Image (cartoon, rainbow, N blue to C red):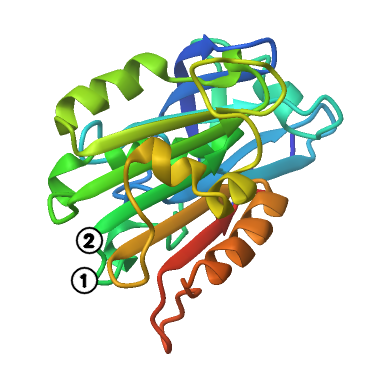
Amino acid sequence: MQSIPRDVILGQVTKRKDWTSNIFTIWVQADIGAYQAGQFTKLALANEQGEWTKRAYSMVSSHQASPGELEFLIITDENGSLTPRLNRLSEGDDIYVGTTVSGFMTVDEIPDYAKDLWLLSTGTAVGPFLSILREANRLERFRKIVLVHAVRYKDELVYHELTQQLIRQYAGKLMHVPIISREEQTSTLKGRIPHLLMHGEIQSEATLDLSPDYSWVYMCGNPAMVRDTAETLKALGLNKHLRRKPGQFSSENYW
């Protein structure tokens, strides 16, 4: 094996959970120091030829709640160079973790004028939002919080128990809006986030309106969702947030 890259350290898988045949969570013991909920780092492995592959993944865990233990929600791409190998990891296996954390999709980046927080995700990109929600003490300033999780099939609505625990913990402040696009379900919305927002269906389900005066929206997931939802939000009167020009929404492209 070639020498270990300078920007990673050795970690160890302490646990894993399989949600579906290709979606899983691994817990990793690695001391990368403090990070903010919503941020990401890199996971890395070397192949048999000693060539390293590194990819960015958001933490589902909270440093505040479990320092030193990192939690990653991953979907396997059979044609990918890293995820098939990550999917073969078991408890006790070695894995390398980036020493640097990145990302601006954090509570600290949300302007003071925001009173309602909307978290719009697709697939495994719900992970960083769960990390943010795990730190309830940092979200006390918001009146309402809406977690939207859009997936193709019902079994991809992962972290059900944690989500229900958070709903109870927030005691009426947190609204959960699951969306399924490829199965008929009577209990959930069906379709794409931008279409459902434009027609007010997500707002109705959350019993909350979107307003440039007090709403803040984070988007994370499929680039097409992020792009199309940004256009929908603009049509609804919200603007992209820039540090030189404050607005009401921002995003993290998940791949």
215 or 91: nearer the eye? Answer: 215
Of circles 2 and 1, which is in front? Answer: 2
Q: Is residue 6 above or below residue 135?
A: below
Residue 133 quadrant: top left
Q: Position of residue 48 (x, y in %)?
A: 82, 26
**Secondary structure beneath label 2:** loop
Q: Is residue 2 above or below residue 216?
A: above
Q: Position of residue 63 (x, y in %)?
A: 27, 40
**The disc labelled 1 sits on which kind of residue?**
Asp
Q: Position of residue 138 (x, y in %)?
A: 17, 50
Residue at 29%, 49% in the rendered image: 34
Which residue in the rendered view is the most extreme toward the bottom?
244
164 or 64: nearer the eye? Answer: 164
**Secondary structure beneath label 1:** loop
Q: Is residue 98 visible?
A: no
Mark drawn on residue 115: 2
Q: Counting other residues with Cα less than 10 Å from the Cα at mark 2, is it few (<14), some (14-19), or many (20 or more)?
A: some
**The disc labelled 2 sits on which kind of residue?**
Lys
Q: Is residue 131 visible?
A: yes
Residue at 32%, 48% in the rendered image: 208
Residue at 66%, 16% in the rendered image: 184
**Location of the N terminus (image quadrant):** top right
Q: Counting other residues with Cα less than 10 Å from the Cα at mark 1, is it few (<14), some (14-19), or many (20 or more)?
A: few
Q: Is residue 203 left or right of residue 48?
A: left
Number of on-image labels: 2
Q: Position of residue 143 (x, y in %)?
A: 17, 51
Discs 2, 1 touching: Cβ within 8 Å: no
Q: CA distance from mark 2 to mark 1?
A: 8 Å
Residue at 66%, 24% in the rendered image: 86
Q: Circle 1 sits on which residue?
A: 112
